Amino acid sequence: MSRIIGTIKGSDIIEQDDKSVTFTAGAQLDGDGANGQFGEPPCYAPASYKGKTLDVLANAGGPGNWYGVVTDTGEDDGRPIVQGPNDPCPGAYVSATSLHLPGKDGKPLPSSSPFKYVDSATVPFVVVPPKIIKGVAGVVMGCRAVVTNTKNNKSVEAVVADGGPSNKLGEISLACAQAIGVPAGEGAKYPANSGGIDASSHIIRYQLFPGVPAVVNGVTYPLQHS
Amino acid sequence: MNILSLLRALVARPSTGAIFCVAVCGFATLPAIAESDVTPSLAGVIRYHFRERLEGVKPGGKQYSAPAYETEQLPPSHAPSNKEQVIEGKVAHLPYSFVINLGGKGAGTLEVKILTADGKPLRGYPKTVANAFAQGIEATSQDFEIPVTPKLAAKIEKGLLEKNQHLTQVQLVVHTSQ
């Protein structure tokens, strides 16, 4: 029997009979995890960086309070890790997702590796609040998701790859937005800081499959206990 | 002779038929021209961007949430003329007045004025964008960063955001409703 896991700002989060989780919401944009892994711009970089970035640096915080980039100490008062000459975007910061990817050998990558994180610019992914992660038995981070824009019926296979605030529902990567026709800040200076669909619109349908590893563009993602 | 038979007679004659067609086509195109001349209505939204420190994260895990935002709507626009749309007003969590004008400084030109409580322009404003919503480019919205002092940021965090949420940026988004 289906049950309501919780409600966030008028949207019920429902665990269905088959253990999938569904809700409808808007779609804010998350550029985190974009480090140029597949040739697209990084999410964040210092002011001295010459190339384009996906988000305005203020959304990563600042000295003493780095909320959105990886630091040398792992704490928000550490110094941001800067990509080196052999990394995809030398000079850019390393932006993280909650979901961590292994190296080619299957072993964990260091936190400073740009490849440890899921690239918002090229991988359709979904952001979920703690209420969902803690509210179901199956592993949510890394699981399969299907995201549908009910306004144009465009749908995409995605992976749950990032954690959102406790009072927000409905956030996706830039690649996910592009795939289902959600404005993804096309032409804007900072695409992740523009676009999206307001949370109150309820036109995006999310279906998550906790415990089922996502397969997106031929890549199987690891399930990660939180 | 009723009106239908009169029209039939007029259209049947080549000279009057041509005049009749031109007149009908002309009237048909008038509303379309008028509609395209009307400046579309505007909407203004304030986005308060933030991140939340997540509780119970394992060592080595991502400590903060993905970025997200809360919103506050500015009042709807009004049209002093067919060529102009204006938004005037305030929002609850900023001590500023907004005057946003589309078309007043020329067709398609967007002007954003932000005034502090003492009526002075906020640092960096007014800002003007030509062809702000021209078709073919980023047609639907324009974004403007609103500077906030640490004191104001703390006040917004206390009044609008929830526990463990940190304001990162305040932004005005102006978009057309057409």
Image (spheres, coloured by chain):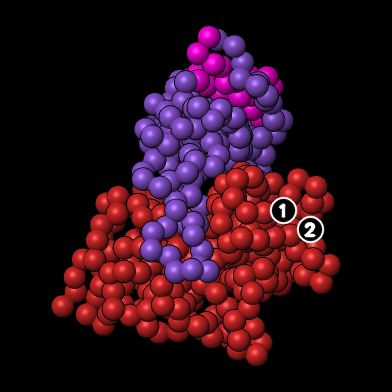
The shade of chain B is: purple
Q: Quadrant of residue A70?
A: bottom right
Residue B167 in sight in this render:
yes
Which residue is depicted at the point 40% across and 84% down? A212
Residue behind mark 2: A91
The range drawn in magenta is B96-118
**What residue occupies the far bottom of the structure in this picture?**
A105
**What residue occupies the far left of the structure in this picture?**
A1
Q: Position of residue A143 (x, y in %)?
A: 43, 78
Which residue is depicted at the point 59% across and 11% down? B120
Rendered red, the chain in question is: A
Mark 2 is surrounded, within 10 Å at the Cα level, by few (under 14), some (14 to 19) or many (20 or more) other residues, namely some
Q: Position of residue B125 (x, y in %)?
A: 65, 22
**Type of residue at label 2?**
Gly
Quadrant of the snapshot with the N terminus of chain B: top left
Which residue occupies the foreground of this view, A108 or B113? A108
Residue behind mark 1: A45
Circles 1 and 2: CB atoms closer than 8 Å:
yes
Q: What separation in Å lies between label 1 and label 2 (alpha carbons)?
A: 7 Å
**What residue occupies the far top of the structure in this picture?**
B118
Tag shown at residue A1: none
Tell which subunit mark 2 falls on. Answer: A
Mark 1 is surrounded, within 10 Å at the Cα level, by few (under 14), some (14 to 19) or many (20 or more) other residues, namely many
Q: Is residue A36 above or below residue A11?
A: below
Mark earlier in primary sequence (1, 2)? 1
Which residue occupies the foreground of this view, A75 or A90? A75
- Residue A135 among those drawn in magenta: no
Tell which subunit mark 1 falls on. Answer: A
**Type of residue at label 1?**
Ala
